[in-house]
Amino acid sequence: MTREEIKTELLSIIDPYIDEKEVTTNVSEQSDLINDLNINSAHLVDIVLDIEDKFDIMIEDDFIGKMDTVGNALDIIQEKLEG
Amino acid sequence: MSQKKRVVITGLGVVAPNGLNINEFETALRSGTSGIRKWEGLEELNFKCQIGGRPAITQEYKDEHLPQFIAKKLRNNAVIYACLSGLEAWKDSGLQLDSNQQRRSGIIFGSGAMALDEFIGANIDMLNQGQHRKVGSRSVPESMSSGAAAFLNGILGLQGRILSNSSACITGSEAILQGFEMIQSGKMDRMLCGSTEGDGQYIWGGFDAMRVLCSDANDNPTYGSRPMSASSSGFVPSGGSGALVLESLEIAQARGAEIYAEILGGEVNSGGQQNGGSMTAQNPEAVVDCIKTTMNNAGIKSTEIDLISGHLTSTKGDPYEIKNWSNALGLSKEEMPYINSTKSMIGHCVAGAGSIELVAGVLQLSKSFIHPNLNLEEIHPDILGIVDQKKIPKATIEKDINIILKANFGFGDLNCCIALKKFDN
């Protein structure tokens, strides 16, 4: 999967956790999940579970804290897919 | 001392087995449409009762009517029903969703076996398999007793009192009575009141084990719920939610709200689980006291009552309930008012019952009709000795009615009664 394909999948996962529908259309790799996209921090664990299901990977708890921006989340998913 | 405030109903919402909103529900009540169906899966699980009432909510319906997080991610039917009915009631009353700073508006939304909705099955499996991390964050608010009110207020943003009662089958009517009292006393101006119950084998298994569910209509589901019948054999379980917006009369009139009805008063009490009362049966003296006190609080005489909306679950207890009504009202057989039971169409929504049935009562008052009792080919002989059969309608009666007495009775020997009146300024 290309990084762009992964990003498309990731945004569709994040989408239901965001109140304002339009936010996902202006998401960059620098967008912070909590501060920019207004995702409730409690929902980060749910997004991780959704990512695991979608990409059939396992993301250990240590990585969850590092998934602060869209770009960092993509790095982690890519690393797991290649690993 | 400040005067007691008059309290009116300005918004209605409902999710019932025979109607997903107020319009559908009113149509179903008028036409006598049952929402009871064969429940897939219960036969394989060895249930004696294999029928139930489930609101026919689809994913498309949720997407259309709920914020997308709730529509796409929540799984607990009790929460979903509550959000749908609560939101409908709020919008129906003409209130906006962006009304911040509502310091004097609140919510009372009750529930029964909140965490035993079907959704819990997958979570329990994961917990038992050592996979608890997979239940995710939503399992907490979706299973807490205050979950319905919490998710609902995530949408509405009210800043007054937000609470969640739980009192078995009186939960719904108790929520409305508590909201009424908060407004009457001047503590709050506006309360969204209601209750909800999910559905499925985890809630119903215990009732089936108690042998209180209907087991003789698995091949004829709509015939299962037949309150007041000579052949009533147990209640039909169901899920759903009702919601009502209550406001002080002055607040409602100041914003030009449409008023459905006025709440005159009510009472909630317990029989103390003595003198015939127990966990599962009502102390008859306490029931009579609850109804009499309601009439007293409401300032009405029994001859003024046009309709009794009973608890009447389709069990052997129905004739006892009618006897209690008769004793409380002190009326002869000929003088007894009309009696109906919404459960003949929707089954028993347990904690959701009271609020859904109050919505039915308000609709009958404001739209001038009395809905039929289904499956009453043969009324129980003990009931016929107390009430003229003309007063137990089998078909819809189009009629102007002025006062309804609504009651629910619940496990723990709990009673709740409310008097509703057509609004008259």
Image (tube, grey):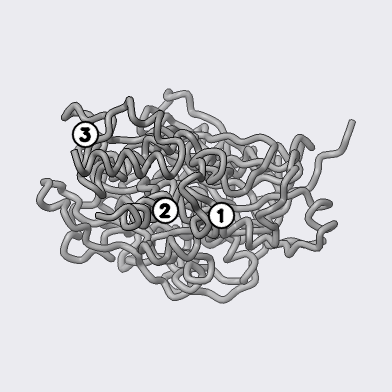
Q: Label 1: which residue?
A: A20
Residue at (15, 48) in percent of width and height: B48
Mark 1, secondary structure of its residue? loop
Q: Mark 3: few, some, or many residues within 10 Å (few <14, many ≥20)?
A: some
Which mark is drawn over residue B126? 3
Q: Quadrant of the N terminus of chain B?
A: top right
The C terminus of chain B is located in which quarter? bottom right
Distance (Cα) linking label 1 and label 3: 32 Å
Percent position of residue B43, x then y: 12, 53
How far apart marks 2 and 1 lie (CA) works out to 29 Å
The label on residue B240 is 2
Instruction: Point out the frontmost of discs 1 and 3.
Output: 1
Considering depth in this image, is B405 or B338 the residue closer to the camera? B405
For disc 2, the neighbor class at 10 Å (few under 14, some 14 to 19, many from 20) is many
Badge 3 marks a residue whose secondary structure is helix
Q: Compared with residue A25, is residue B192 higher up or lower down, i.e. above or below? A: above
